[in-house]
Amino acid sequence: MLFSKNHVWLDIDGDIGKIGITDYAQKKLGNILFLNVSDIDDEIEIGSTFGDVESIKSVSELFSPVTGKIIAINEDIIDEPDIINEDANGSWIVEVEISSISEDLLNDADYKEYIETL
Amino acid sequence: MKYDIAVIGGGPAGYTAALEAIKYGYSVVLFEKDLLGGTCLNRGCVPTKYLSHVSEMIYKVKNAERYGITVDTVNIDIKKTIEHEQTIITKLRNNLEELLKNKGIEIIYGEASVVGDKLVKCNDQEFVADNIVIATGSKQSDIKLVQESITSDEALLLSTIPKNIKIVGGGVVAIEFANIFNQLGSNVTIAIRGDRILRKWDKELSVSITQTFKKKGIKIETKCSFEDFNEGEYDCILSAVGRDPELCGFDADVFERDSNGALVVNKDNCTSKNNIYAIGDVVSGSSMLAHIAMEQGRRVIHAIAGEQDNSDIVIAKCIYISPEVASVGFTELEAREKKINYIVGKVNMISNARTVISTEDRSFIKVLADRDTRRIIGAHLMCEGASDIASEFVVVMKNGLTIDDVKSSVHPHPSFSETIMDVMDELLEKVDGV
């Protein structure tokens, strides 16, 4: 699993990747109320937004760690977004057919080190 | 009898055209085969808003415990409810008739038919008019997905509240009835062919309504087949699958029409025949909204008078549920398709005092702006008072106002609409980076 400094994680399997938000992000957001995500077949780019997450504290945009095409959306999470608060790393939001990956992604240890600095 | 203008149909399009024509000094005859006010007043906007209001009162009383209000039993006498509905509609219809007559409009009740370019026949009498305006409206679609179903017309006159109701369709009418019956205490299931209700609306609004409905116990069955529509144990199935143009009163075959049978018109609302115009729901591509029909009614008279106004009509589309939903201008999808360099500002109303006082439902205001021109190009709202707040965005977009213009317009506190100021802050942050 890789992590971005925008606090999304990427789990890669071949040229398919699942994207979710990190445990750090869910803690900062608080109780998540709503997820607004792009559609299946939408093209997304590294650094561009693919939706937003609405919590009791704020509305935060989701920045993509990859360029590619959305091939699936986790409807269970859309129906009950607060599942993310219970298990952020186990709650993928979108599945993407990847054409390229951001070079700025961090491994688990580096991401942990990064969030220590925040 | 000779008139400057003959209007066929006394709904919002027809009566607005007739009233506008009087302002120009034209002599006007208006034909109505049924009830003045059309679908809107008699079987559409007004009675559904009445039932929304009644059902919301019940819902609020039943859910008032958090305010310290408890009511042992809430009863509804639906026959009395419907009687009062009819009293209100009759009163509004009478007011309308009086207004039209006072303005000097000749009202003829009967089924009119266009028998020549300038000739209308009704009740065996002939009426000559220099211009004819067809405003015959629309009717329930003939599509029958469920054999034993009722229409929305019939749903407005129910003598009992169904325990279990299935609503076939995912458009505005279906959604509003789902909200009404849910608040009246029915178990409601919506059945649709596609995978999302309100597919022509901003996706976020559609998903938000789905979530709100699910929390209120309304089931939504997606990707339904014909067999699915007919399945299940329900004491009432409401079919709300759209409307067709009402083509009575003229020989439809002599006019150019689209694949749905609706009349094709030019930018001045003139049909394929000179001096015969069409407005409202009978027109090709109609949004089936009364306020658009009314604006067409005004504009068609301006065109007849040689004062064409072909500017874009900025409209607010509203859904009267709890909380209300409204949409003005571009959705994100439309902005993308038009390759507009747009930004989105969205604020949920969890810190808006008026919202927190009045509802526990998730509420938000989302605004799209053109990054290059800073103009507001779209607004999508789900909140208390959304249908009224939307009017602000109509003014903003009609006049090409910018994020800065809106931000510098002080909104009252406390109000639902003050959230717009927070949305402008978000947009300014994105566009200026401060």
Image (cartoon, coloured by chain):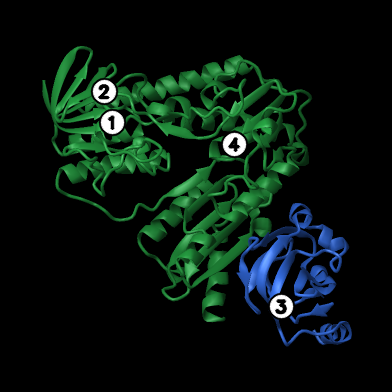
Q: Amino acid at mark 1?
A: Asp
Is B220 situated left or right of B158 in this image? right
Disc 4 crowd rating (10 Å Cα; few below 14, some 14-19, many 20+) is many
Q: Which residue is mark 3?
A: A65
Give me the residue at 72% from left, 60% from top. A73
Give me the residue at 73% from left, 43% from top. B214
Give me the residue at 23% from left, 47% from top. B268
Q: Nearer the viewer, mark 1 or mark 3?
A: 1
The outermost residue toward the left is B2
Q: Amino acid at mark 4?
A: Gly
Q: Which residue is mark 4?
A: B169
Chain identifier of the blue chain? A
**Mark 2 vs mark 3, CA separation in Å:** 63 Å
Label 1's element?
helix
B208 over A72 or under it: above or below: above
Label 2's element?
strand
* Residue B76 picture location, percent across and down: 67, 20
Q: Which residue is mark 2?
A: B31
Q: Work out whether residue B229 or residue B50 is closer to the camera in this orientation and state it.
A: B229
Q: Amino acid at mark 3?
A: Pro
Residue B253 disc label: 1
Q: Are marks 4 and 3 on the same chain?
A: no
Label 4's element?
loop
Q: Are marks 4 and 2 on the same chain?
A: yes
B385 over B312 or under it: above or below: above
Q: Work out whether residue A86 or residue B227 is closer to the camera in this orientation and state it.
A: B227
Residue B339 disc label: none
Answer yes or no: do the residues labelled 1 and 3 have beta carbons within 8 Å? no
Is A85 situated left or right of B36 in this image? right
